[in-house]
Image: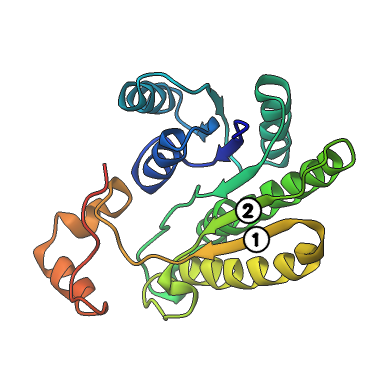
């Protein structure tokens, strides 16, 4: 099998790092991304150690809410790895835990910019890259995977920006998927519940929150630690 290449945004820790790890184990070369240089370097070392360094991993620091950062990710994949086969949009934040009336425009924008606009920018640029590659390759099996949340469909009081961003992610995914369904690009979303990662540290440190959150899920618990 020819080696394939994947970009995973928000892959310095948590779900993003675990996703990158599994792609590396499957033999994919990676571009991993985060806003934090130190965490990104540590993630690269952890992944290489786990797989005995058998794939190439390139780091690309940046905030994917910035359009130029998303464009650069595609350029890095092209220049360093030779192209792009898969994009995983994982970068995201929870945002404030507040009543709607207390949320500022700055807080709203920050969550929507990272969780939704960033995924749109990266997906748009990935589709461009994949379509251009099809013109010079006898190959049309590309994929974009959006990591959403159960709250794309389940209301989440005290988290209006987050829930709205994930509701938008669901429709973004479905609409883009229909646009490119006949072009050899698959676009899907995965919508997990709360997982025991640093992103949910406020829940993990509060037994009452753990119990309350668990009651909202089928198995009456949050997802276990993944890394």
Q: Quadrant of residue 73?
A: top right
Residue highlighted by disc 1: 187
Whole-percent x and y of residue 74? 71, 34
Residues 30 and 111: in front is 30
Q: Is residue 54 left or right of residue 6?
A: left
Residue highlighted by disc 2: 144
Q: Residue at x 81, y 46 (%)?
A: 128
Residue 217, above or below 25 = below
Q: How is the image coloured?
A: rainbow
Whole-percent x and y of residue 31? 56, 30
Q: Is residue 31 visible?
A: no
Q: Residue at x 55, y 73 (%)?
A: 167
Are the residues flagged by discs 2 and 1 in contact, CB closer than 8 Å? Answer: yes
Residue 142, above or below 179 = above
Q: Is residue 2 visible?
A: yes
Would you call the spot at circle 1 few (<14 residues within 10 Å), some (14-19), or many (20 or more)?
many
Would you call the spot at circle 2 few (<14 residues within 10 Å), some (14-19), or many (20 or more)?
many
Q: Residue at x 48, y 79 (%)?
A: 153
Look at the image and tell me in which quarter the C terminus lies.
top left
Look at the image and tell me in which quarter the N terminus lies.
top right
Q: Quadrant of residue 157?
A: bottom left
């Amino acid at each position: 099998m020819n080696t394939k290449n994947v970009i995973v945004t928000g892959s310095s820790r948590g779900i993003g790092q675990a996703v990158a790890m599994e792609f590396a184990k499957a033999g994919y070369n990676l571009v991993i991304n985060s806003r934090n240089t130190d965490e990104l370097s540590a993630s690269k070392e952890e992944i290489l150690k786990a797989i005995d360094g058998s794939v190439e991993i390139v780091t690309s620091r940046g905030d994917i809410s910035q359009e130029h950062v998303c464009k650069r990710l595609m350029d890095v994949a092209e220049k360093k790895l030779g192209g792009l086969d898969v994009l995983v949009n994982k970068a995201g934040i929870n945002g404030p835990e507040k009543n709607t009336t207390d949320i500022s425009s700055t807080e709203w924008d920050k969550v929507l910019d990272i969780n939704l606009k960033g995924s749109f920018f990266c997906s748009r640029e990935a589709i461009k890259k994949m379509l251009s590659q099809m013109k010079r390759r006898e190959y049309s099996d590309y994929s974009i995977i959006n990591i959403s949340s159960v709250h794309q469909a389940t209301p989440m009081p005290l988290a209006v920006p987050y829930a709205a961003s994930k509701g938008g992610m669901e429709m973004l995914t479905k609409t883009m998927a229909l646009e490119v369904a006949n072009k050899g690009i698959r676009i899907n979303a995965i919508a997990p519940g709360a997982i025991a990662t640093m992103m949910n540290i406020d829940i993990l440190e509060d037994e009452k929150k753990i119990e309350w959150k668990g009651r909202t899920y089928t198995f009456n618990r949050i997802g276990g630690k993944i890394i």
